[in-house]
Image: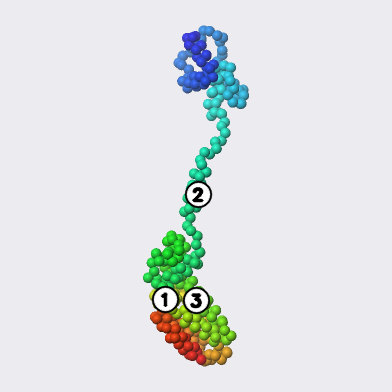
Amino acid sequence: MVASSSKIVSTLTTPRLARNHFVVGLNVGPPAGPKKISSGPTRSPTTLTQRKSMISEEPATGLEPATSSLGIGLKLLSLRWSGGPSRPARASTTPWNDRSRSTRLTLMARPREFDADTALDGAIGVFREHGFEGTSAEMLVNAMGIGRQSLYDTFGNKWQLYRSAVRRYGLGECAAHVEALRSGVRAIDGINAMLRRVVKTAYQPCLGVGSICEFGVSRPDLAEVHAPLAKTLRAAIAARIRDAQRDGDVASNLDSEAASEFLIGNIAGIRIAGRGGANRAALTSLADMALKALR
C-alpha cells in the first residue's frame, strides 16, 4: 500500500501526467472506506472551504509550475471550476466574400429601375394601335421595356394599366388642344389651329376615341377617366368661342357650350375618317366645314 501511494505521488509530480491523474482521481472519487498510510507525517484533512481558500491564494497569472502534486491538482481544479483560463476573442475566419455573398445576391436580384412615365408611354402606343382586347401582356412588356412583375407591381393588372394609359394620353391631348386654342392673334385663329392639328395627326390612332368606341359607357371606372378630361376641353373651347363672338368672328346667337360640343364631335369624326383612309384633302374639307358652321 505504501509503495502504491508513493507511485501515485511521484506520478503527480510530473507536470503533464499530473493533470490527467489528478482529474481522473477527482472524477472517480475516493474509494469506499478509509485508507491509512503508515509512512510520512500525518496531515489533517482539508475541507472544501479550505481548498477554495487555497485556490484563491494562487496567483492569477496562468499555470505557474507547482511544487507539489496538491498544488498542481488544486490549480487544475480551479480551472475546471472557473471554466478554464480566459481566451482572447477569436477573429472570424469566414472570408469576406462568403460573408457578403447574401448581400451580393440581394443586389443582383434587385429589379432594374425604370421611369414609370416612359414605360406608360410604351403601353399607350400598344393600346392606341390594338385596343384593350387586342393587347397581350407580352406585347406590353416588350413595348414598356420592363418585366411582368415590375408591370404588376407598378401599374396593377391590365385593366388598371389601360385606365392609366387612357388618363395620361387624355391629359396630353387636352393640353395640346388648349395650347393650340391659345395660339394666334385672334380667338378664331386658335380654333382653326386646333382643327388643323387634328387633321395633321388624324392618321395616328387616338386612344381617347378608341377607348370610347371599344367600351362606350359600359365601364364606369373608365367613364370616370373620360369625364374630367372632356369637361376641361369643352370649357376651353367654349371660352374661345365666346372670345371669337366678341371679336365678331363667330355668330353671336350661337350657344358657346353647344358649339363646343359640335367641334368636339367634329374632332372625333376627323380622326375616325383619317384612320379609315381619308386623304388629307378630305380631312381638311371636314375642318373647313366645321369653321364655316360657326360663322
Mark 1: amino acid: Gly
Q: Which residue is mark 2?
A: 103
Q: Which residue: 51% across, 11% down?
A: 6
Distance from disc 1 to disc 3, alpha carbons, whole Å, reads: 14 Å
Crowdedness near tag 2: few (<14), some (14–19) or many (≥20) residues, C-alpha within 10 Å: few
Q: Which residue: 57% across, 33% down?
A: 88
Q: Which residue is mark 3?
A: 173
* Residue 65 image position (x, y, % from top left): 58, 20
Q: Which residue: 55% across, 25% down?
A: 78
* Residue 264 image position (x, y, % from top left): 47, 82
* Residue 255 image position (x, y, % from top left): 51, 88
Crowdedness near tag 1: few (<14), some (14–19) or many (≥20) residues, C-alpha within 10 Å: many
Q: Earlier in the sequence, mark 3 or mark 2?
A: 2
| 71 w.r.t. 231: above or below | above
Mark 2: amino acid: Thr
Q: Earlier in the sequence, mark 1 or mark 3?
A: 3
